Image (cartoon, grey):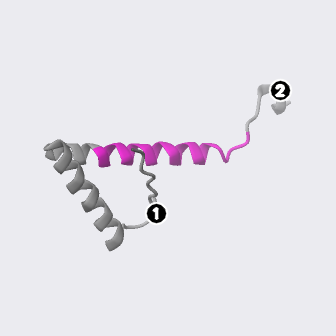
Amino acid sequence: MFVSVSAETVGATNKDGMDISSDFEGRIIQSTDDHCESTFLFQRLSVLIQRYNAVAVLGTFAHTTPEDDV
C-alpha cells in the first residue's frame, strides 16, 4: 500500500498535522509491535525533506561551464 504524504517545511506543525502524525505512529506500533519504528519513519521523512529542499535550492542556480566564463 502506498500513502502520499505532504509536509510543510517552513514553520511549526499545527494540531491537525500532529494528529495525523500520532495516528501514523499508533498504526505503525500496532502493526510492528516496535515503538522505535515510528521514530525511524519520522527520521527518514525528515532526511527526505532536507534532501528535496537542497535539490530545489540547487536547481535555482544557473548551470555554467568554463566556456561560458570567457
Query: Which of the labelled discs sits on residue 51, or is there none?
Result: none
Question: Identity of the amino acid at label 1?
Answer: Val
Q: Gap between marks 1 and 2, in whole Å?
A: 38 Å
User: Residue visible at 26% across and 61% down?
Assistant: 23
Question: Which part of the image, by quadrant, shows the N terminus?
Answer: top left
Mark 2 is on which residue type? Answer: Glu
Report the number of discs: 2
Residue 18: image location, x then y, percent: 30, 66
The numbered disc on residue 67 is 2
Magenta segment boundaries in residue numbering: 41-62
- The image quadrant of residue 59 is top right
Q: Residues within 10 Å of mark 1 (few under 14, many from 20)?
A: few
Quick check: is 30 in the magenta stretch? no
Q: Quadrant of residue 40 in the image?
A: top left
Q: Quadrant of the C terminus?
A: top right
Which numbered mark, 1 or 2, is in the foreground of this view?
1
Indicate the secondary structure of the residue bearing disc 1: loop
Q: What residue is shown at x 59% (from left), y 48% (from top)? A: 57
Residue 51, position as x, y percentages in the image: 48, 42
Q: Foreground: 56 or 22?
A: 22
Q: Is residue 55 left or right of residue 49?
A: right
* Residue found at x 22% / y 43%: 37
Q: Earlier in the sequence, mark 1 or mark 2?
A: 1
Q: In this orientation, which residue lies closer to the viewer: 32 or 61?
A: 32
Q: Position of residue 45 (x, y in %)?
A: 37, 47
The residue that disc 1 covers is 10
Q: In the picture provided, is 51 more to the left or to the right than 30?
A: right
Secondary structure type for disc 2 = helix
Residue 19 spot, x, y in % from top left:
29, 67
User: Quick check: 20 above or below 28?
Assistant: below
Q: In the image, what residue occupies the spot 73% across and 42% down?
A: 62
Q: Main secondary structure of the magenta part?
A: helix
